Amino acid sequence: MVTPKIAATPARRRSATTTLLIATRKGLWTLQSDESRRAWKLNGPHFLGNVVHHAVLDPRDGRTLLAAARTGHLGPTIFRSSDRGRTWKEASQPPAFKAGSGRTVDHTFWLAPGHASEPGVWYGGTSPQGLFRSIDGGVSWHGVDGFNEHAQRKAWCGGDQDGTPDGPKLHSILIDPRDPAHLYIGMSSGGVFESTAAGADWRPLNRGVRADFLPQPDPEYGHDPHCVRMHPQSPDRLYQQNHCGIYRLDRPSENWMDIGATMPKSVGSIGFPLVLHPHDVDTLWVFPMDGSSVWPRVSPGGRPAVYRSVNGGRTWQRQATGLPASQAWWTVKRQAMTADRAPTVGVYFGTTSGEVWGTRDEGRRWRALARHLPHIYAVEAV
């Protein structure tokens, strides 16, 4: 007798959620929504009263969450959660320069999960400029000697006491999804650097980028990239938002193309964050700031706006519907703007005045998702 086949019951699809990790001057919060992205729930804080520079979920396991914090009693450290933030433990060995180096980590500024083929590997960038690696999921950290001990490191960084007004930083740690040994970093100050040897050696990659603040405007190194991004689906395409403009690089070329020159002259091309469309290599968003002598920075004319390009930077479109039309002087930090991976992409940013803004339609209309948070350093979409 032939046993009849019973059709399998289709698996019930889990409702997709979007979670924003919001790192601030006084703790870590989350915003969560269902797949409609209409209503958002604010949760937190974690680490209330402590500076959180960056928080990142490991996309390789969907559970491990790291937060880079500067605490009053522990100093600069890393906190780790293996249950998506329900419980936390401090790293047993946070990033620290070698004894006798004369250098001290002020804070860890940037966290980056390693290559998909290397579970447990994380990278961290610090202030002052240092590169660190963990192979145990963020529990213990060790310096990447190929950078930290490089004979040219001090020259690249402009000396250990040099840097941006709020401290020198190593940031924008990028891992080529095709090759775990191929890495990029950004340094403020210093520039963009590349390694093809898993960090064992490095070289500058700054050709075509201006450094208007230096006596020589086109040096090999000494630049101030604010944020560098690699496209996840086309890793030969890199973009950077720089102190001196917006640039695009199409490898194997080593010459950055100035795509900020097409921004409106009244707005300029200086800003901190840069976000890429996850499905379209030619679409990106930037958030300009007043690049004149005003410090701390403000939005141009008190009229904040996002600018989008859909053609790799040849032209730009102002996207400000829903944003304040006047008397809004906040800006957005380099890590505080992100995008989700929905078919119609949501873009989100956090402000220096503690607001989180978002769009469900790729920037056509914005609305405030949260208000009255502390000064926001970083926003990451999970």
Image (spheres, rainbow, N blue to C red):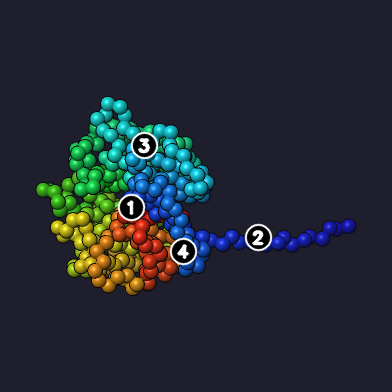
Q: CA distance from mark 1 to mark 3?
A: 20 Å
The kind of residue on which mark 3 rests is Leu
- Dot placed on the residue nearer the N-terminal end, 1 or 3: 3
The residue pinned by badge 4 equals 40
The kind of residue on which mark 1 rests is Tyr
Q: Nearer the viewer, mark 4 or mark 2?
A: 4
Between 274 and 218, the one nearer to me in the picture: 274
Place of residue 305 in the rendered image (x, y in percent of width and height, measured from the top left): 29, 67
The residue pinned by badge 2 equals 11
Between 85 and 122, the one nearer to me in the picture: 85
Residue at left 40%, top 67%? 359
Residue at left 22%, top 49%? 224
The residue pinned by badge 1 equals 377
Residue at left 30%, top 70%? 324
- Quick check: 47 left or right of 299? right
Label 4 Cα neighbours within 10 Å, binned few <14 / some 14-19 / many ≥20: some
